[in-house]
Image (cartoon, rainbow, N blue to C red):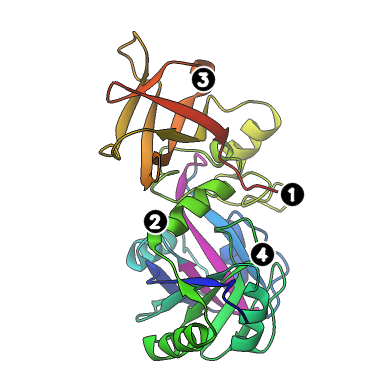
Amino acid sequence: MTKLVSFYKARPACHLRLWGEDAATFLNSQFSADLRTPEAGLCVYGLWLNAKGKVQADSWVWCRDPESFEILSMGTAGENLREMLERHIIADEVEMEVLEGSTLLMVQGKDAEGAVAELFGAVPEAGGFIEGAGAVCYPGRRARGAHFDACFGDSTAAEAAVATLQAAGAQAVEGVAIELERIAAGYPAIPGELGTADLPGEAGLVGEAVCTTKGCFLGQESILRMHNLGQARRGLYRVSGEGSVPELPAALRQDGEERPVGELRSAYATDSGWTGVAILKLNRMGAGLLCDGAPITAGEAMGPVR
């Protein structure tokens, strides 16, 4: 391990355990990612949608065995996600509990694989997880290069991993740096940037976080209709401006017009001003965008950079 590794420690908003005879079929009917063949070691990212296909939450789901799963979300509180799932349990043999005290450690950089191998004894492959040192570790989705997330069951194990990283020269980074890297990589924050009024296709997530080939799941009909026959009227875009960070949320307008053409949903300070994410009407994408009367620049559409 060298100094070409950085890490960030955070508390997940939600860590649930879900188990039971019908756990796999129930989750597959609710989750946007493919859980048709659950095997121990499977780890997938996806969305929780409503019947209209609008985004309610996101999470990772990992399978310890075909009847036991864990769910982790950084943006939706555990009790909220639990209540949302319980509304759809009818005759399913499923039980849930909120797990408290978890810590998430994000590890990235050119030597991230070496750091993870030293901490956990192996490197997880895409679509899977490994266990070790009191954590579940899997490839993350917040940066463009190699990066991994490790979910620790308690803070003591997490602090021991941090101490190992620091002793080898790894550097801690601030949350703003993590968010700017995430935006550059095209991953939207949910529900802060893509939320309950929005569709996955507006952020390029259909086919990436939403499976289009599995059986029925909540919101599937609306998603596939737009994916196969229609086109999104709005899109999530990287935007930037000069000066201080605007107060959020902020309406975006075109020069000379009063009616908003979009909304700024996140913004983080940079050396030259600020960078953030906005939802914009696709038929109004052009020059002259304003935020609080100041010009801004719309860049590339959000969506995981491949």
Tell me the crowding category of disc 3: few under 14, some 14 to 19, or many 20 or more residues within 10 angstroms, Cα based.
some
Q: What is the distance, in whole Å, between disc 3 and disc 4 at their CAs?
A: 37 Å
Q: Amino acid at mark 4?
A: Leu
Q: Position of residue 194 (x, y in %)?
A: 45, 43
Q: Which residue is mark 4?
A: 35
Point 44% across, 54% down: residue: 179
Q: Amino acid at mark 2?
A: Val
* Circle 1: element type: loop
Q: Is residue 125 above or below residue 154?
A: above
Which stretch appears magenta?
Answer: 52-72
* Circle 3: element type: loop
Q: Which residue is mark 1?
A: 213
Query: Would you identify the image quadrant in which residue 250 lies?
Result: top left
Q: Which residue is mark 2?
A: 176
Between residue 10 and residue 268, name the one nearer to us: 268
Q: Amino acid at mark 3?
A: Met
Is there any visible trace of residue 211 in the rendered image?
yes
Which of the two marks, 1 or 3, is nearer to us in this view? 3
Q: Which residue is mark 3?
A: 285
Question: In the rendered structure, which disc, 1 or 3, sits on the residue that comes first in sequence?
Answer: 1
Relative side of 38 to 217, left or right: right
Q: Position of residue 306 (x, y in %)?
A: 70, 48
Question: In the rendered structure, which disc, 3 or 4, sits on the residue that comes first in sequence?
Answer: 4
